Every structure is written in structure tokens, then in C-alpha cells.
Amino acid sequence: MALKTAQQYEESLRKLNFKVYLQGELVKSPVDHPMIRPSMNSVKMTYELAQDPQYADLMTATSHLTGKKVNRFCHLHQSTDDLVKKVKMQRLLGQKTAACFQRCVGMDAVNAVDSTTFEMDQKLGTKYHDRFNKFLLKMQEEDWTVDGAMTDPKGDRGLSPSKQVDPDLFVHVVEKREDGIVVSGAKAHQTGAINSHWILVMPTISMTKEDADYAVSFCAPADAEGIFYIYGRQSCDTRKLEGGDIDVGNKQFGGHEALMVFDNVFIPWENVFMCGESEFSGMLVERFAGYHRQSYGGCKVGVGDVLIGAAATAAEFNGAAKASHVKDKLIEMMHLNETLYACGIACSAEGHKTASGNYIIDLLLANVCKQNVTRFPYEIARLAEDIAGGLMVTMPSEKDLRHPEIGKVVEKYFRGVASVSTENRMRILRLIENITLGTAAVGYRTESMHGAGSPQAQRIMIARQGNLDKKKELAKAIAGIK
Ligand code: SF4
Ligand code: FE
């Protein structure tokens, strides 16, 4: 099977034996849990749209391994055109879900592990690349959602992994056996972990020789023995337990993050892609981060499209759409959003082929893209709140609107223009609240800051890639300085 249907994806998740804790309780069926299900729906959309002929060009690609049609999320980019289509696909999915659809981390991880294992084998004579290709083949054939897992808890940021008081604060090898390795530790903020079939673990920082046990990369089934998850809380998440459909803002879709814990997990050698080669850990981190920083030039823009549309609709419902300052604010929001998109497209168009044959983005432009993402969604959100008005955070609940007596009062006093029902006005305002302050704000705001690396990480890469010496030479040549 090269392409799973959305329903087959859901059924395949049901078969997994996840151990997930949510609000202090073990979850029986994650797929059916009202707080988890909307996030599963977002991943499901990556399967659903791949079946739709009108999106085939963006959502699917031809495998370089088999020549068969695969979901683009399982594909290694074979050209700059593939890189551009990746960003367009992410914008599309952001528009359809108004949430984080989670599947990109696996796509970004396989593209980074592919080129890194190839170059590592060439230099060190290791045998990782072939093993990795076997995993990739299976991922494409089974149309797996893979969770690319990078971020360790990191403990004291001033200490290296091996100097931490607790050795588990970074994922590490605790035992090397003839048949494989045993790993312990945890990965934090794992996007879509509970909606994934497999996980692909990478180191979180460039390791030194003394931290060689921490330079480890491997794949494992998401429900492997010894792996368990603690589900992350989101702002307003328990509204999903109330059963209504207005107050949640976005009833159908969401995202999730979880703490992924490895308690002495056995990984057979065939699933190990780095084990002690500390000098290649930095390359893997830099490439994965680069791909994921490109990703944000797509997904956040798609969610931004929905937020801009919601703000424009709220302005209409408020009767303020014709005000020149409102029009100007909407123009500013579009300008900022398209600037992010331009960066996502630019770093893709300027990509190049790696030694293994897949394509990588221009790292400088991908880091500029993500640096802008740490700022512009905040401004877009600020403008959306400005246009929406304070009612977005002060209006009564859906239960009040539906109440046999006070419902009439809510209906009367919270109406904007006469032609639009109070219910619809509440719906659009709750959507803005959801994206700017509610569950989707994890993906649209704070993740824009810290996801794919915090702002300082991009500034370090911009400093490294920006070629300041060349710029000085240019200035000196023009100024006539010898
Ligand atoms: Fe994909 Fe964006 Fe979510 Fe990352 S934050 S997994 S790029 S949707
Ligand atoms: Fe992310």
C-alpha cells in the first residue's frame, strides 16, 4: 500500500498500544479522546488531501526508491521544485486545519538523516545509510506518520549532557549489545507523537567526544516497549471536554505536543543511524533545523491566512469593514504573512543537491525565514485582536447563548450588524481567540517563537552563513580602500 486513506490511517493508529498519560490518567483510546482527537484529525487531513486529485501535485510525489507514488510527507526532496511544493503543501494544510498538522517533523527528519548518514558512511566507513534506506522504504510503503524527535529536556543549560546531575536529561546509550543498543532519557515538546506510527530520534545539539553516548540517532515504533508519553496541556484545552462547538473556536482540528520518555528501550542495530559519531551530530541538527525552519514559511502562513480571513469577517460582522484603518490593518497582516511565505519559497528555490542526492534548502534563507516567524505572527495576532474587539475574550459561553431565558439577552446585546446572527459573530470571534490565545496558539504563537529552535539559534546560523567578510570587501572596493 503506497497511499493510506484517512480512515485507514485512523484504524492503523487504533492498533497501536500507546501508553499515554493525560491529566494524571492513562488514556484508554487516544484516537477517541476528545482532547486528542482534533489533533488526530489534522494529521488525517494529510492523508485525505493526498487522495484528492486536485491536490495530487502538492500532496504526493514519486519515490526515488521505487518510482511509486507516495505521500509527500514520506518523500526525499529530489529537486528545488520538490522543496517549493513542500512549502505550498504546508500552506494548504495550514489553511485547511488552522492548526499544526504535525506530520512535517518526520519529513524533515528523514531528509536530514538521509544526507547525514551518507556523508558519515563516506568519511567513517560506517554502514548507516543502507539501514536508513530500508526504514525509509517501509515508511513510504506503509505511508507512516513519523515523529522526528530532537529536543531533549536539557536540564541545566550551562552544562553539557554528560555533566548534568541526571544523565537522562539528554537521550543516551546506556548499553551496547551484540544485537542492538539500550537507550534512556526523554524528548520534550514532541509534536504529534501520539498520532505517529514510528519515531525517528536525533541528537539535540552538536556533541563533543566526551558526550559521544549522547550522539545517537535511531527509529522505533511509537508504541515500543519502554516508551511512554505525558500529554502537554494547552490553553483552554478542557473546553474540548464540554461537548459544545462554539467556545472551542475550532471544533474539528488541533495539534498536540507530549513528553516522550524512554525507559531502557531496546533498539536493534538495524534501526540505529548514529551511535557515538559525535562529529556528525552537529550536521544532523543543523540540517533538520534548517528543513523545519523552511517548514514554518508554509504552515504558519496557512494558519495566518485563516486568521486574516477571520479578522476581516469579524470586521464585517461588527459593521467596521469599511473603516480605512481596518482596511489598512488587514493589508499589513497580508503583507507580513506573504513576507513569511516569500522566505519559505526563497530558501526552497535556492536549495541545492546534497552528496546523497536529496535536496536541501539554502540554510541562510531558511534561518531568516524562521527568524521572521518569531516576530510576524505576533504582530498579525495583535492586529487580529485589535480588529476583533474586546468581546473576543469577554463574551458569555455557548451555554448562555443556548439558555431558554438568558439566551435571548445574549442574542440581543451581542449582535453586531443586523444581518448576521449573534451565534455567527460568536463563532468567528472564538476562532480568533483559538488561534491567538487558545489551543491553536501553541502552534501559531509560542511555537512560532521556539519551534524549530529559539530565535537565538537562528541568529547564530545567520552570523555563520551571512558572510560578513564578503560584505566588507564589497564596501572597501566601492570606497577605494586597498
Ligand atoms: Fe508542521 Fe508547522 Fe506543525 Fe511543524 S509546526 S509540524 S511545520 S504544521
Ligand atoms: Fe514545529
Image (cartoon, grey):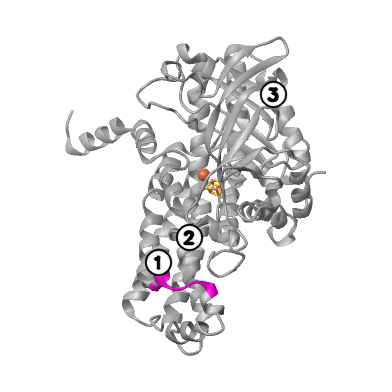
Q: Amino acid at mark 3?
A: Asn
Graded by Cα atoms within 10 Å as few (under 14), some (14 to 19) or many (20 or more), the crowding at tag 3 reads some
Q: Where does residue 174 sit, x and y in percent of width and height?
A: 59, 15
Which residue, as the protein is rendered here, is positioned at the far bottom?
418
Q: Which SS class for mark 1? A: helix
Q: Nearer the viewer, mark 1 or mark 2?
A: 2
Q: Which SS class for mark 3? A: helix
Q: Amino acid at mark 2?
A: Ile
Question: Considering depth in this image, is 449 or 370 the residue closer to the camera?
Answer: 449
Q: Where does residue 248 sit, x and y in percent of width and height?
A: 54, 64
Name the residue: 58% across, 59% down: 240
The residue wearing badge 1 is 384
Answer with left or right where residue 72 lies relative to residue 239. Answer: right
Question: Considering depth in this image, is 49 or 42 the residue closer to the camera?
Answer: 42
Q: Where does residue 357 sit, x and y in percent of width and height?
A: 63, 31
Which residue, as the protein is rendered here, is positioned at the far right?
1
Quarter of the rendering containing residue 107: top right
Name the residue: 47% across, 75% down: 313
Image: magenta residue range: 391-399
The residue wearing badge 2 is 435
Residue 103 lies, with reference to residue 169, above or below; the image says: below
Name the residue: 35% across, 75% down: 326
Q: Is residue 453 magenta?
A: no
Answer with left or right where residue 476 lies relative to residue 229. Answer: left
